[in-house]
Image (cartoon, rainbow, N blue to C red):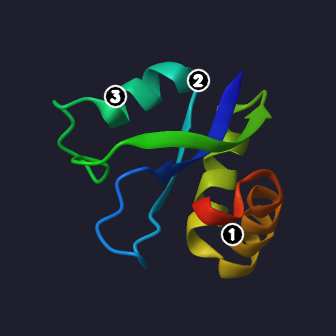
Amino acid sequence: MYFVYVLKSLTLRSPRDKKYYIGYSSNVLYRISQHNSILNTGYTRGRSWKLVYLEAYRSQAVALDRERKLKQYGNVWQGVMRRIKESLDPFEL
């Protein structure tokens, strides 16, 4: 099983700073721990992250394609954000 996930930053550097990260993995819990690790040197370094959205796929190729579409197409991302918005506290958005 492969998962496409959206993480939200818990580390806000300004009131308008609302960072999200989109990724895919076969082991989401492990990937989140990597993103939150002090040894992380990638895009997500220096912040704390929490999982806010998850989709499951049987195929790695389909999960990777979905991740790319979320990153490249604004209307696809807006659809996901509408779903996320319904499940988050209004102050978290």
Number of marks in the rendered image: 3
Which residue lies under the disc numbered 3? Answer: 34
Asked if one can make out residue 16 in the rendered structure from this viewpoint, the answer is yes
How far apart are the two marked residues, 3 and 2, measured between alpha carbons?
A: 13 Å
- At 30% across and 48% down in the image, what residue appears? 47
Q: What's the residue at 35%, 36% (across, down)?
A: 35
Query: How far is mark 3 from mark 1, CA to CA?
Result: 24 Å
Residue 24's image quarter?
top right
Residue 11 percent across, percent down from the top left: 35, 53
Q: Describe residue 66's horizontal placement relative to residue 83 as left or right.
A: left
Pick whichever of labels 2 and 1 is earlier in the sequence.
Answer: 2
Q: CA distance from mark 2 to mark 1?
A: 21 Å
Residue 19 lies in quadrant: bottom left
Relative placement, left or right, of 7 versus 34 is: right
- Residue 16, position in %: x, y? 43, 79
Q: Which residue is mark 2?
A: 26
Mark 3 is surrounded, within 10 Å at the Cα level, by few (under 14), some (14 to 19) or many (20 or more) other residues, namely some
Quarter holding the N terminus is top right
* Amino acid at circle 2: Ser
Q: Amino acid at mark 1?
A: Trp
> Which sits in the foreground, 24 or 44?
44
Task: Please say whether residue 93 is visible from this viewpoint.
Answer: no
